[in-house]
Amino acid sequence: MTTKSAAAAARATVYGYPRQGRDRELKKAIEGYWKGRVTADALRSTAAELRRTNWRQLAGAGVHEVPTGDFSYYDHVLDTTVMVGAVPARHREAVAADALDGYFAMARGTQDVAPLEMTKWFDTNYHYLVPELGPDTVFAADSAKQVAELAEALALGLTARPVLVGPVTYLLLAKPAPGVPADFDPLTLLDRLLPVYAEVLADLRAAGAEWVQLDEPALVQDRTPADLNAAARAYRDLSALTDRPKLLVASYFDRLGDALPVLAKAPVEGLALDFTGPAAANLEGLAAVGGLPGKRLVAGVVDGRNIWVNDLEKSLSVLGTLLGLADRVDVSASSSLLHVPLDAAAEKDVDPQILRWLSFAKQKTTEITTLAKGLARGTDAIAGELAANRAALASRANSPITRNPAVRARTGAVTDADARRSQPYAERAAAQRAHLGLPLLPTTTIGSFPQTGELRTARADLRAGRIDTAGYEERIRTEIQEVVSYQEKAGVDVLVHGEPERNDMVQYFAEQLDGYLATQHGWVQSYGTRYVRPPVLAGDISRPEPMTVRWTSYAQSLTAKPVKGMLTGPVTMLAWSFVRDDQPPGETARQVALALRDEVADLEAAGTSVIQVDEPALRETLPLRAADRPAYLAWATEAFRLATSGVRPDTQVHTHMCYAEFGDIVQAIDDLDADVISLEAARSHMQVARELAAHGYPREAGPGVWDIHSPRVPSAEEAADLLRTGLEAIPAERLWVNPDCGLKTRAWPETRASLENLVAAARTVREELSGS
């Protein structure tokens, strides 16, 4: 039962909402602007309409306080960099000339100026643009975006709460700017940054904000006493301001630990806490510090990152416990709903039984408002919703879709020997060199080549029945022929087939594995205008038939050079899907690994001598707390080895990772026991090569020399300089030359120019090494 005072206080809210629109209108408008087909005014108009649509949807569902400022043309951390005036020196001229074009230049770079580094947002597949700071950084407030979007929401008659990246998290996410010593600590700039936040808060208060949310997710990581002292000082100083709105400090993705008492004692008016997954420990932590007397608590009890229907009764139990720990308890998702698709009701092809188990952003909003209603008025007020929820949960728990006895028997029979190569690396390397006959500094690409409009049209035509399977496959054969022929002419040493048949590196495999569910409209932002449709792990996983052998073998038939087989690894198949929450992830990973092991064996039997199993999500999925990492890395590395360890010694196993901080997982990279790893390195100036060297990594590696997430074409000399830097850390006999990532998102003209420059750079450095 709820108390009368609690009933009066309970409200529904969210921290953020998907940005793209029902039909990805934002993506289309931005890319149209880049191509000159959409004007800046038209782009702004589209963005404003999307914001209005989102707010009206939220308000119509019963959300009492809508977020503003969470909308972004590219990335909310980049928006914060603009807000605090921390534009890098190399971009200031472009920003001064045209703020919108300068903004996109920071995100994507230009032919003459490199973009900001990009990496993963904590343990999600969302990418943010890393702030570049130094001892000479001068901050200056620019609250125009935040104030304008608040005004838009208020003009609709809505109660609105601006959402900002908090000052401590902003600095903890930053890196030393180019030319600044690597040991520079951006957190030393806090006293310089806080007056800028004070000015922004004052501007928002003047514009009508009663509350402002300051997101501090970095505080759920292991933090030093200095970090925690900085957080205490930041919120002491901001709270002391006289001209400010009420402050709601938010954390999410994990438990706060030692940071919880710091925030609980801070003189702010409210906290927003995650109570899902490992963050459920926040409940105990909150009780241990005596709760939040006199303060507002926004309780994140609906999972903002996964798509399974909420257990309403369980969430109500948590909320009931929280009522005694705060002056006011409101209901929300555990994080921004940016990380889930927009609307499950759009999925017309999903089995109705499974559809009732799914909850996307719109459905989660309904769950939140239902919980707020139940908390305020009692369970009788939501009796119908609770009954329907119990039925949905029981349907999933009892469905034969979720369990395959044969799959479970196979995973149960796995032994330690199944996850080990038959010979040590040194013996394998000698066998592979003899078998493959590659030159010093061998060149390759990561796998995909440009996905042209013609390819996408062909896939759409096949789905719509405008062409038959034979016509579609002829188009794929032609594309593979062109990609293989081009690579041979360009002088690439280890070729790929270009993946023209693949819509996405996870979805393509998910559509061919039993136990996965693919959506038609489940788009989620990965970075900028790059959206993906994460498949759903609905049941036990198995491989009915080979998935890649046919097209890889066809490509190999066109050339005497080795063609890599290309697969997505088990950890990434989980991380870039919506994973099951009804069994441990390690068990699901083992099922996927065994399915991939079958594919690896079939590729090898068909004559494929080089097989790449990509694991870009290995670092991304690393738990945010160090105490949780050993268990994760144990099952994650075992799953990779289980997928790859059944091959002969002379079959070369590659893996690939990109856009993450690799220093924390160098030992895990070693534990994968891959023969070759390719890694993102261009934007981070070969940092990973130095990290591998410091660890004593004994195998071959290809730190990327071409940043493929920017349209700029690196010169041959630029690529050669990066190679020379790489050689300072990795011996030439173990160094590969490759781009940072796949080429799917690039256009053919820049691909040809960049790849030819990459090959030229390799030849130049080979000649330097040989002394000729």
Image: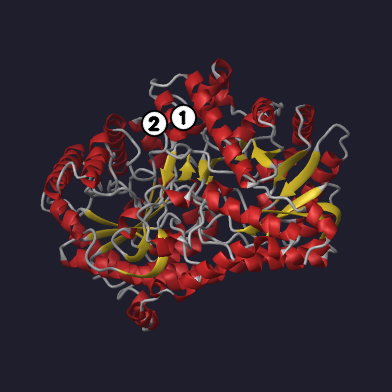
Q: Which of these two is toward me, 766 or 652?
A: 652
Left or right: residue 754 compared with residue 83: left
| Image point (44%, 59%), residue name | 355
Q: Quadrant of the C terminus?
A: top left
- The image quarter in which residue 549 lies: bottom left
Left or right: residue 153 compared with residue 413: right
| Image point (64%, 56%), residue name | 370
Q: Secondary structure at mark 1?
A: loop
Residue 226's x, y, as percent?
Answer: 77, 52
Residue that carries the numbered disc 1 in the rendered image: 109
Q: Secondary structure at mark 2?
A: loop
Left or right: residue 465 compared with residue 566: left
Q: Which of these two is toward me, 617 or 578?
A: 578
From this viewpoint, which residue is outermost toward the top?
A: 97
* N-terminal-most mark, 2 or 1: 1
Give above or below for 429 relative to 202: below
Q: Residues within 10 Å of mark 1 (few under 14, many from 20)?
A: some
Q: Quadrant of the N terminus?
A: bottom right
Residue that carries the numbered disc 2 in the rendered image: 711
Residue 394's x, y, as percent?
Answer: 51, 73
| Image point (49%, 24%), residue name | 43
